[in-house]
Amino acid sequence: MLPPVQLPDKEFFTMGEVSRIVGVPPHTLRYWENRVGFPRPARRSSGHRRFTRKDLEAILSVKTLIAQEGLTTRAAHRALKFERTGRSRAAPEEEGSRGILDLLREVRREINAMIQDLK
């Protein structure tokens, strides 16, 4: 279990500050930015990243998903995407697709029965 992180009372953070707060090296943050897609920090005119509190919270979520739950970057991306849209990360069968799967199985049985009749 990761200890809770106390966020400084600031509006914007630099890459170095975020790295120290989250406890991961800057190259890991850049990797997560590319592979997970979250966060998308704003850039200054000099090209430096400018992280907001929301970005920092997203980074902490990614760290929790990868470090605690053992998810891959792709799975973490999906989990955060579901979280942002308000859907659960449950399997599709648990989200109401059970009826569709049953219907498809029934159609498959009928097609197999037709194939047997034609033989």
Image (spheres, rainbow, N blue to C red):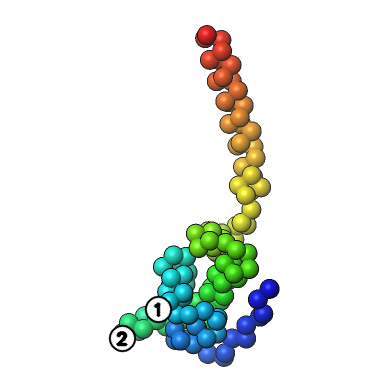
Query: Which is more toward the observer, 18 or 10?
Result: 18
Q: Give the foreground label among 2 and 1.
A: 2
The location of residue 35, given as percent across then percent down, is 44, 65
Mark number for residue 8? none
Q: Circle 2 sits in a helix, a strand or a loop, which is it? A: loop
> Furthest-bottom residue in view?
9
Query: Which is more toward the observer, 76 or 1?
Result: 1
Decide if residue 7 is on the left or right side of residue 43: right
Q: Residues within 10 Å of mark 1 (few under 14, many from 20)?
A: some
The location of residue 39, given as percent across then percent down, is 47, 72
Instruction: Residue at 56%, 72% (x, y): give it.
Output: 63
The location of residue 27, given as percent across then percent down, is 43, 76
Instruction: Residue at 61%, 29% (x, y): give it.
Output: 105
Q: Quadrant where the N terminus lies?
A: bottom right
Determine if residue 12 is in view: no
Q: Which residue is mark 1?
A: 42
Instruction: Residue at 31%, 84% (x, y): give it.
Output: 45
What amino acid is found at the position of numbered circle 2 in the picture? Ser
What amino acid is found at the position of numbered circle 1 in the picture? Ala
Q: Residues within 10 Å of mark 2 (few under 14, many from 20)?
A: few
> Furthest-left residue in view?
46
Instruction: Residue at 40%, 78% (x, y): give it.
Output: 42
Q: CA distance from mark 2 to mark 1?
A: 11 Å
Q: Circle 1 sits in a helix, a strand or a loop, which is it? A: strand
Determine if residue 16 is in view: yes
- Residue 26 higher or lower than 75, as above or below: below
Q: Which residue is mark 2?
A: 46
